Amino acid sequence: MKILGISCFYHDSAAALLVDGKLIAAAQEERFTRKKHDTSFPKLAAEYCLKQAGITAKDIDYVAFYEKPVLKFDRLLHSCIDTFPWSLHAFCKSLPSYFTEKLRIHKVLKKQLGYTGETLFAKHHHSHAASAFLCSPFTEAAILTVDGVGEWTTTSYGYGKGNTFTLFKEIVFPHSLGLLYSAITGHLGFKVNNDEYKVMGLAPYGKPVYYEQLRKLIDVKKDGSYALDMSYFTYHYEMAMTGRKFEEVFGPKRVKESKVEQRHRDLAASLQKVFEDTFFQMVKHVHRETKCDNLVLAGGCALNSVANGKITKNTPFKNIWVQPAADDAGGALGAALWAQHCVLKKPRSFAMDHAYWGPDFTTKEAEQFLKENKIKYTTLKTEEIAPTTAKLIYDNHVIGWFQGRMEWGPRALGARSILSNPCNEKMKDILNAKVKHRELFRPFAPVVSEEDVHEYFDIDKDDEKFMLFVYPIKPDKQKLIPAVTHVDGTGRLQTINPQQNKRYYDTIKEFQKLSGVPVLINTSFNIRGEPIVCTPKDAYRCMMGTGIDYLVMDKFLIKRADNRKDMWDSESLAKD
């Protein structure tokens, strides 16, 4: 049974392929088109998935689409009618895409892939729920999905057991915890559906002085349900998300790229606290309803790693699993899993224990690229790769790390990463100045060898494979790894073991031999505003347009200083 899952036409388009219930490949379209959060039909991602399985579109039994476009159009119509005439401009702007693409999925599939078979349509939050539960390590679990909006649903919860699940309750548009976060993200001068994680990173620099005012905007019940005071918001009828009334209470909107003031930091801190309080109230109620110790999460709000790291301390749940691609990209995988198990009633046979489901390149392909472009490089023996890289990191060089299959989801997890020295307190500024060109308040993430995690982090489990939880760094270790210690003493960590990614793990252990510290800085291999690099060409281009010192690609070591410098100006393009 071959099922291709598709998500597209809103943000983070993606494709995922199941063969007999097992995941073969999954990738976001942005990785191929180089357009961040690409919304277009994931033609290249789908073609990659088919190629990885050695099949064509004619071999697919079903395509599973991640939401119901007709139901989404129903919401658009009702919202327009309810808020007319203010909604007319936004409605007219949205309308063409529905008639050319969103309501014509069958025709789009035929045109883009040559697929003419049956298409199954899951509800948006069923796709999220399936992506969270049906590839989790649990045979039963409570399920919570929270995002901006699907068709109508913005929040849902339920229970999964075996190869199926049921969603008991939902909250519907315009009331949305995700859209509340996005609205204030926009008010703070950041990009909606892109920069919410920046607000989360900014929050520790502020104090929640606006907490009481914000709490008046959201009425949270004991059962975790909530309703927003929509008089402060405009996203339900126009492209802007907050209105004049919001500015009267919280001040004028910050101009993009302007100075971040203390009031902006305080509003971010207040928002994060309101988010956590509401989120934990929901989580507690889900536990009361399901009486299950396991919780699975998906939806864009499940990427709030600060809140995720506090769940077990603030709720009765003991075990938490979050879909690595918790955003709409993960809906492609969720739709395929929903079709496989809930529609076709097939038993589960797959649990996601790593996130390396994207494209890879053979040693021959990597060397061919280097030779064709007359790039100077050194070939390392297999046993030299980890110690050579570790020594370069120890000497405070910045390394582009390009190894194996690319990551699924928004996080770099040691396949397409930039690695550097966490012990150097200046490394954060070096990375920002030389490579990332991003806001100075944003933290860099640590990766730690799994067996050493409890020595460095106050963590309530033994591993964190997907970098989706923030935990406190132990006070006596913070001075050892200042470059990954955020202002509040925390880090969004990844753990690694040799079974997951041996070369990555070995590099960390070699660095430990030199420094005594089993931790590296791991940040995504890209500049601000661009997707993570996918191909050898992407990786080399990123290095040569930035201050990355070395590229370790497969077994090849490329030194930036040995090759033509400044082939492009990354800093001028580093915009969201």
Image (cartoon, rainbow, N blue to C red):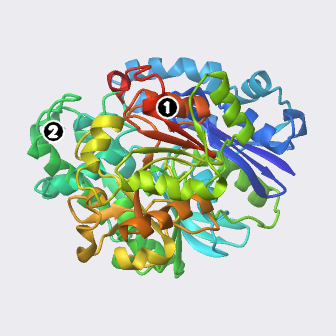
Q: Is residue 531 above or below residue 97?
A: below
**Furthest residue toward right:** 59
Q: Which residue sits at x=72%, y=47%?
A: 25
Give percent across and percent down for residue 421. Answer: 35, 55
Q: Nearer the viewer, residue 67 or 46?
A: 46
Q: Is residue 126 left or right of residue 116?
A: left
Q: Nearer the viewer, residue 378 or 570?
A: 378
Residue 491: numbered disc: none
Query: On the rendered image, what quadrant is the C terminus found in?
Result: top left
Q: Is residue 474 left or right of residue 124?
A: left
Residue at which label 1 appears: 76
Q: Earlier in the sequence, mark 1 or mark 2?
A: 1
Q: Is residue 120 above or below residue 509?
A: above
Give percent across and percent down for residue 396. Answer: 34, 50
Q: Nearer the viewer, residue 285 or 373?
A: 373
Residue 260: numbered disc: 2
Q: Is residue 197 left or right of residue 99?
A: left
Give percent across and percent down for residue 164. Answer: 71, 66
Q: Amino acid at mark 1?
A: Leu
Q: Is residue 335 above or below residue 533?
A: below
Q: Which residue sits at x=13%, y=42%?
A: 250
**Cα–Cα gap, marks 1 and 2:** 35 Å
Q: Secondary structure at mark 2?
A: loop
Q: Which residue sits at x=56%, y=67%?
A: 158
Q: Is residue 197 visible?
A: yes
Q: Residues within 10 Å of mark 2 (few under 14, many from 20)?
A: some
Give percent across and percent down for residue 386. Answer: 55, 57
Q: Secondary structure at mark 1?
A: helix
